[in-house]
Image (cartoon, coloured by chain):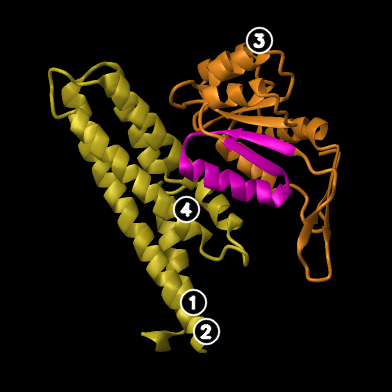
Chain colours: A yellow, B orange
Amino acid sequence: MLGMGAGRWEEDMSHLLALLFHQGVLDEHFMQLQQLQDESSPNFVSEVISIYFRESEKLLRNIRTLLLDRECTDYRKIGVYLNHLMGSSSSIGANLVRNVCVAFRAASEHCNWAGCLRSLAVLEHEYCYLKNKLHELFQVCYIQTICMHSS
Amino acid sequence: MRKNENRDSILGHLPAAFSRVVIARNRQGCIAMTSSSKKILLVEDMDINRVLMRKLMKGLDAELHEVQNGEMAVDYFEKGNTCDLIFMDKEMPIMDGHEATRLLRILGVKTPIIALSAGDLQSDRDLFIQAGANEYQTKLILSAAILSAPNGNRSVQGI
């Protein structure tokens, strides 16, 4: 695998990023995040993404908990959690997750419990897809770095 | 407001706060702040956004102070602290950005306030400006403006 050379892995990384931008999963804010990474903080992007994953999963758990009781759903609180998730998703360029939050927020503002449940399912699906793809990206980046150092 | 106008607008507020921020490289290539470095107060509750802003501000070499909600921002000034520029988030627990901005102006705080938000709703913009913010920007535009600020010698005159 390492014999493939850094160039091949760099190509894979570019293709993956291009796909994610084309699908609308990521936007230009992700590129700005990459611009912040430098020699003084070589793992900046992965550190920020780790914080994003941690915070997002907590928010998603909280939202799911709030939707457990149909009669006493606190839609205002769901809105607050969604705003947070929107904000952090926007900050790292997670465009699709952010957009799903916008739609979800509309359902919560209308106190539409069924709509909220459906939106949560979509949100969790898109979040999982994003997480898997970013892990894949970091894996390719890591292998590329190893190839560069071993050549 | 187009992106270039946004950038000039943001940087236009920094001139009052950063009359001269000169970054000099010493022999080891480290960046040293001059005595004219300025203080920014970041009012933001989310960890991820604070991490990003710290990194962005490092590029400008400003002294960054942080509080996690609007009430703490008001306390900061009530205790007699000052700063040259405030970045104010919108959604925060205990006291949000609109209310904090309004109270700071009632207290007589004249420091420029740049309201930050993930979204770009006109209603949010209007509320912030009515509360007394000088400018309203999405976080995307702000980071784009700072990242595209002069690099190299980084003599940020008039910024």
Q: Quadrant of residue B139?
A: top right
Quarter of the figure that contains the C terminus of chain B:
top right
Quadrant housing the N terminus of chain B? top right
Residue annotated with mark 1 = A145
User: Does A48 appear above or below A117?
Assistant: below
Compared to A63, does B23 lie above or below? below
Q: Earlier in the sequence, mark 4 or mark 2?
A: 4
The span shown in magenta is: B39-66
Q: On what subunit does the disc labeled 2 rest?
A: A
**How many angstroms separate mark 4 from mark 2 (CA)?**
24 Å
Residue A149, numbered label:
2
Badge 1 vs badge 2, beta-carbon distance below 8 Å: yes
Badge 1 element? helix
Residue B106: numbered disc: 3
Name the amino acid type tagged 3.
Ile
- Residue B29 image position (x, y, % from top left): 78, 68
Q: CA distance from mark 2 to mark 3?
A: 59 Å
Residue ID for mark 4: A48
